[in-house]
Image (spheres, rainbow, N blue to C red):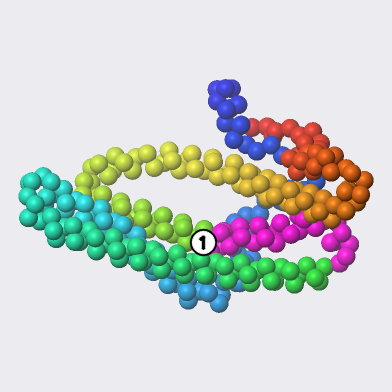
Amino acid sequence: MSALRRAWARFAPAFDAEGLVKQAPPVPVRTIARRFWPYARPYRPWLAVTVLLIAVAAALEAAAVWVFKLLVDEVLVPKDLAALPWVAGLFVGVALVGGLVTFADDVLSTWIGERFVLDIRVRLFSHLQTLSPAFLDSRRLGDTMSRISGDVGTIESCVLSGVADALSYALRLLFFVGALMLLQWDLAIVALLVAPAFYLLASRLARLLKRASREKRRGAGTSSAVAEEGLANMALVQAYGQEARGSSASARRASGRCVPSSPPRA
C-alpha cells in the first residue's frame, strides 16, 4: 500500500510556496462560469448553432456504427456482394456529411472562442490601467503578461470550448449507448458495468489535475517574469560580460531551484 501511495504521489506536482511567483488560489468552476458567462452574451445565438452541429455530428457517428452493422449483416455474414454498393454508398454519404458538419462546427467554435478571448483580454487590459501603481509594482510584469495571454485562454476553455467538448462527449455517449442497446443490449449492459470505476478514477485524477494546472500557470508566470527581467537588463549584463552567469541564474529561477522545494504530502 505504501508503494502504491508513493507511486501515486509522483503524479502530484511539487510546488514552492516561496517562489518567484505565488500560486493562484483555487477558484470553483461555478464561480468562474458565473463571472465570465455574461461576456459570452453576444455569441449566444452562435453557441446554439454549435450545439446543434455537435448533436448532429454525434448522431452521424452513431449512424456510422449502424451502417457497419448493415455491412456485417447484409454483406459479410451471408457472403452476398449484391448489397455492397448501396451499403458502401450509405457509409460514404454518412462520412461526407459528418465531415462537413464537423468542419463547420470547428470553424464556428474557433471563431466564437477567439472573439471571446479578444474581448476578455481587452477588458482585462482596460481594468489593469485603472489599478494603482502600488498594485502593479507588487506584481512581476512577466507574470502579468502571462496571465493576460495564458489565463484568458484557459478561461475560454472553461466557459465555452470546454463546455462544448463536455456536451459533445455526453451526446456521443448517449447515442452510442442507444446504438449498443439496439444492437446487443446484454453486451451493452456488461460494458456499462465498468462506468462507476472510471468515474471514481476520474474524480481522483481531477483533484490532481486542478493542483497541477495551478502549478503550471505559476510556472508559466515565473518563466515569463524571468525572461522579462533578463531582457530588460540585457544591456547591463552585456556591459559587464556576465552573460553566462545571467543565463545560469535565469535557468535556476525559471526551474524553481532558486530556493529549496519539497513535494506536498500525498
The front one of 227 and 66 is 227
Residue 106 image offset from top left, x and y in percent: 45, 64
Q: Is residue 78 left or right of residue 47?
A: left
- Residue 213 on image: x %, y %: 63, 47
Task: Using the rendered image of the protein, determine whether residue 30 is visible from the camera's viewpoint.
Answer: no
- Please provide percent x and percent y for residue 242: 88, 43
Instruction: Label the magenta part by its dominant secondary structure.
Output: helix
Q: Which of these two is toward me, 69 or 208?
A: 69
User: Which residue: 84% across, 61% down?
Assistant: 136
Note whether 187 is above or below 84 in the view shown.
above
Q: Quadrant of the C terminus?
A: top right
Amino acid type assigned to the residue bearing label 1 in the image:
Ser
Q: Quick one: quadrant of the N terminus?
A: top right
**Local secondary structure at mark 1:** helix
Q: Position of residue 230 (x, y in %)?
A: 82, 50
Which residue does the image show at 77% across and 55% down from the upper left? 142
Residue 201 is left or right of residue 124, and the answer is left
Q: Residues within 10 Å of mark 1 (few under 14, many from 20)?
A: some
Position above or below: 247 against 36: above
Left or right of 112: which side holds 264? Answer: right
- Relative horizontal placement of residue 131, taking residue 150 as reference (left or right): right
For this orientation, the residue located farthest to the right is: 240
Q: Is residue 39 magenta?
A: no
Q: Residue at x 61, y 60 (%)?
A: 153
Instruction: Identify residue for label 1.
Output: 161
| Magenta stretch in the rendered image | 132-160
Please say if 14 is above or below 95: above
